[in-house]
Amino acid sequence: MSTATREPRRAPRPRADALRNRERIVTAAREMFTEHGGEVPLDEIARRAGVGNATLYRNFPDRDALVREVVCSVMDRTSAQAERALAETGDAFAALSRFVHAAADERISALCPMASSTFDEHHPDLEAARERVEQLVEMLMERARSAGQLRSDVGVGDLMIATAQLSRPPAGTGCEHFDRFVHRHLQLFLDGLRAPAGSELPGKTTTMEDLRQACLERAGTKAS
């Protein structure tokens, strides 16, 4: 019997139709979570995706797995928007502004609250997606700050929480009717970020860690 070392067998690549089904499920879930909140029945998500319940559960064994995938997907799409903005070579503040408007269109305000209420926020997939977003947004802000266009007393947390709060109300509240106001209000906010600052902000610069801590405290209050 040969003692030659054998190469480990590679896991088979997912079939194209299986990948398409998974993407359809994630897209349908993102839409329905935004429209109705995180408690939408999974069979309704499967129906919108055009797949059977068995296909949904084969990809996502429980609700937490699906919600996590949707939140990571939105964060990945937001990161892609930030990368596109960083690739622009023109006005740094204009690139930051375009990113903020694009991030709002990803519906982060409707989906991000689920990240702190329905599953382990320290899951490695979620942490990796979150860190990537934070790093890219910090790079965008630092570029505008170095150009003397962004006021010095704002942080990534300030930008992201304002974008989330101004972009849409919580999921399941008829929020599609507010879309016409979103970009108008975001532009008012962005104008307030320009340097030189017109006033002194109360409190201190908000970081993403500040936001995570606030979410944990809020979740603890609800639990008690």
Image (spheres, grey):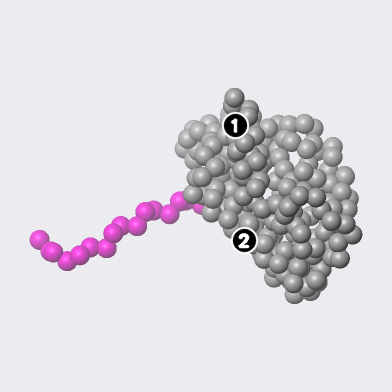
Left/right of residue 159 with respect to residue 63 in the rendered view: right
Q: CA distance from mark 1 to mark 2?
A: 28 Å
Looking at this view, name the residue that lies furthest to the left.
Answer: 1
Looking at this view, name the residue that lies furthest to the bottom.
Answer: 89
Asked whether 208 or 75 is in front, the reply is 208
- Residue 6 drawn in magenta: yes
Q: Residue at x 65, y 48 (%)?
A: 210
Name the residue type under label 1: Gly
Asked whether 80 or 43 is in front, the reply is 80
Looking at this view, name the residue that lies furthest to the top.
Answer: 224
The quadrant of the picture occupied by the C terminus is: top right
- Residue 146 drawn in magenta: no
Does residue 28 appear anywhere in the picture?
no
Left/right of residue 67 with respect to residue 82 in the rendered view: left
Q: Residue at x 63, y 56 (%)?
A: 133
Of marks 1 and 2, the one in the foreground: 1
Q: Residue at x 72, y 54 (%)?
A: 205
Asked whether 115 or 6 is in front, the reply is 115
Give the magenta range.
1-16
- Residue 162, labelled with which disc? none
Q: Residue at x 73, y 47 (%)?
A: 161
Does residue 209 appear anywhere in the picture?
yes
Secondary element under disc 1, as helix, strand or loop, is helix
Q: Which residue is mark 1?
A: 220
Magenta residues: mostly which secondary structure? loop
Q: Which residue is mark 2?
A: 135
Q: Position of residue 188 (x, y in %)?
A: 88, 53
